[in-house]
Image (spheres, rainbow, N blue to C red):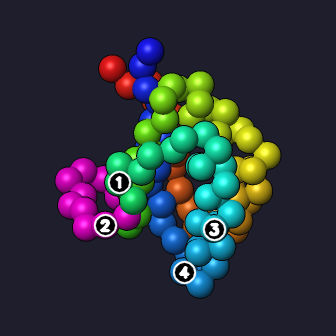
């Protein structure tokens, strides 16, 4: 079965509030077996501007990735993130 991935590009508007999102999201990520492949770090923007923070998270399946995003645990965290950052997030199926 193909793995599922979250690919996120984030521009943080309130760096003081963002750690609250990270803490709130942790239970959902643990529950659904998230494995961070990239989380911030140095990057080179080759085309377009998608923010300063780039995240790739692997899940065992695309369904797990979707379930994590739609979970009550993550939806609490998402509201915090949306209050302090702008972002783009896609969930894709791996090969």
Q: Is residue 59 magenta?
A: no
* Quadrant of residue 70 within the rendered picture: top right
- Crowding at mark 2 (Cα within 10 Å: few <14, some 14-19, many 20+): few
Q: Earlier in the sequence, mark 4 or mark 1?
A: 4
Residue 59 in view here: yes
Residue 80 appears at what percent x and percent y?
71, 65
Cα distance in 3D space between marks 3 and 4: 14 Å
**Mark 3 vs mark 4: which is more N-terminal?**
4
Q: Is residue 45 magenta?
A: yes
Disc 2, disc 1: CB below 8 Å?
Answer: yes
Cα distance between the residues tagged 4 and 1: 19 Å
Q: CA distance from mark 2 to mark 1?
A: 8 Å
Q: Secondary structure at mark 2?
A: loop
Whether residue 51 is visible here, answered yes or no, is: no
User: Where are the magenta residues, as a range?
Assistant: 40-49
Q: Which residue is mark 4?
A: 15
Q: Nearer the viewer, mark 3 or mark 4?
A: 3
Q: Earlier in the sequence, mark 4 or mark 2?
A: 4
The earlier-in-sequence mark between 3 and 2 is 3
Badge number at residue 38: 1
Q: Position of residue 76 (x, y in %)?
A: 77, 56
Q: Which mark is residue 23?
A: 3
Using the numbered discs, state the Cα–Cα distance from disc 3 to disc 2 in whole angstroms: 18 Å
The residue tagged with tag 4: helix, strand or loop?
Answer: loop
Q: Is residue 57 left or right of residue 33?
A: left
- Residue drawn at (38%, 25%), measured in percent from left and top? 94
Within 10 Å of disc 4 (Cα), the crowding (few <14, some 14-19, many 20+) is few
Residue linked to disc 2: 41
């Amino acid at each position: 079965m193909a793995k599922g991935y979250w690919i996120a590009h984030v521009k943080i508007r309130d760096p003081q509030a963002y750690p609250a999102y990270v803490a709130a999201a942790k239970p959902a990520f643990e529950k659904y077996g998230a494995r961070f492949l990239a989380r911030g770090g140095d990057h080179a923007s080759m085309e377009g501007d998608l923010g300063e923070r780039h995240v790739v998270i692997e899940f065992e399946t695309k369904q797990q990735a979707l379930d994590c995003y739609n979970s009550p645990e993550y939806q609490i965290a998402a509201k915090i993130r949306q209050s302090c950052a702008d972002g783009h997030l896609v969930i894709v199926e791996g090969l």
